C-alpha cells in the first residue's frame, strides 16, 4: 500500500516534466492567452476527476492531468 501511494506525487511531477519542453513552442503557435486557458481547463478537469475518483487509477490519472495543466500554467506565468 505504501508503494502505490508514491504514485500520486510522482504522477504529478512526471506530467509537469512531460509538458515543459513544449509549452514555449505552443505559446508561439497559438498565443499565450490560449495556452493559459487550455492549461487552466486541464487543471479543472483533473481536479474534477480527483474529486469523483472511485479507484486509485482514476486518482492517479486526475493528478497527472492536474500536473500537466500546472506545468503549462507555471511556465506561462514565468514567461509573462
Image (cartoon, grey):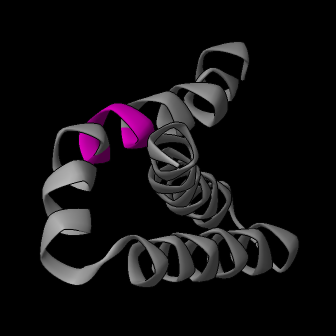
Q: Nearer the viewer, residue 75 or 49?
A: 75
Counting every numbered tag in the picture gives 0
6 sits to left or right of 48: left
Above or below — where is 23 with respect to 48?
A: above
- Magenta portion: prevailing SS class: helix
- Residue 47 lies, with reference to residue 79, above or below; the image says below
Residue 60 x/y as whole percent: 58, 51
Of 13 and 79, nearer the camera is 79
Residue drawn at 62 percent across, 20 percent down? 6
User: Is residue 65 highlighted in magenta?
Assistant: no
Magenta segment range? 15-19
Instruction: Give residue 35's position: percent from left, percent from top.
Output: 40, 74
Q: x%, y% of residue 31? A: 30, 77
Tell me where residue 47 appears, x and y as whole percent.
Answer: 76, 69
- Asked whether 17 falls inside the magenta stretch, the response is yes
Q: Is residue 7 left or right of residue 76?
A: right
Residue at the spot x=55%, y=55% of the render?
73
Residue at image location 64% in from the left, 28% down from the top = 9
Q: Residue at x 64, y 35 (%)?
A: 8
**Which residue, as the protein is rendered here, is positioned at the far right?**
51
Where's the N terminus, which quadrant?
top right
Q: Height in image: 44 above or below 72?
A: below
Q: Nearer the viewer, residue 2 or 36?
A: 36
Amino acid at each position: 500500500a505504501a508503494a502505490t501511494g508514491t504514485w500520486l506525487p510522482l504522477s504529478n511531477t512526471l506530467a509537469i516534466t512531460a509538458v515543459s519542453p513544449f509549452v514555449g513552442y505552443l505559446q508561439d503557435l497559438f498565443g499565450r492567452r490560449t495556452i493559459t486557458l487550455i492549461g487552466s481547463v486541464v487543471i479543472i478537469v483533473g481536479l474534477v476527476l480527483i474529486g469523483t475518483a472511485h479507484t486509485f487509477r482514476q486518482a492517479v490519472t486526475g493528478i497527472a492531468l492536474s500536473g500537466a495543466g500546472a506545468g503549462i500554467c507555471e511556465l506561462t506565468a514565468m514567461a509573462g
